[in-house]
Amino acid sequence: MPIIIAGEQFSGPYRSPAMLEQRAGVYLILRIDAGRNEVLQVGEAARVSQVLSGLQDELAASDGNGEAVVAYAARYTDSLSSARRRELAENLRRQLFPKRDGDAD
């Protein structure tokens, strides 16, 4: 079932990056807690599943005892150039993580 984040439709969320495809896209790393999706990280890659599999060991996932769970989602961008894919990821970062007064550039 797709999810909508910042107006974009993503495949997921999935508990394992292996559920994502080896395709170009923008990915999200999410924290799911009490049914809420909190975006922890936005990235882009030519092979989403491969990049996220490499990051998976660095992220802790809950064993299902009611704690927050790390999950993954992707918006595949096969029709976009790598420059447009990077631009999409950067636009999502700006929307999801707006800078506040006093934040460093």
Image (cartoon, helix red, strand yellow):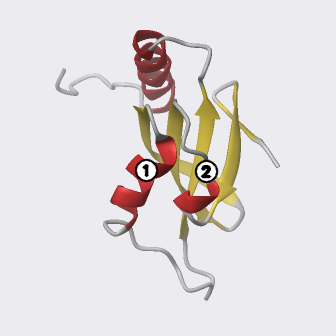
Examine the rendered structure and indicate whether residue 98 appears above or below residue 35: above
Figure quadrant of residue 78: top right
* Residue beneath the point at 55% across and 51% down: 38
Estimate how packed mark 2 is, as few (under 14), some (14 to 19) or many (20 or more) residues with alpha carbons within 10 Å.
many
Amino acid type for the residue under numbered disc 1: Gln
Identify the residue under disc 1: 50
Q: CA distance from mark 1 to mark 2?
A: 9 Å
Residue 48 in the image: x percent, y percent? 49, 42
Residue 104 in the image: x percent, y percent? 17, 26
Q: Is residue 102 left or right of residue 5?
A: left
Q: Is residue 24 left or right of residue 6?
A: left
Observer-nearest residue: 34 or 57?
57
Figure quadrant of residue 86: top left
Examine the rendered structure and indicate whether residue 35 appears above or below residue 80: below
Q: Is residue 102 left or right of residue 32?
A: left
* Residue beneath the point at 61% across and 51% down: 20
Identify the residue under disc 2: 20
* Residue beneath the point at 52% across and 30% down: 24
Examine the rendered structure and indicate whether residue 35 appears above or below residue 30: below
Q: Secondary structure at mark 2?
A: loop
Determine whether label 1 and label 2 are within 8 Å by CB: no
Residue 77 in the image: x percent, y percent? 59, 23
Q: Secondary structure at mark 1?
A: helix
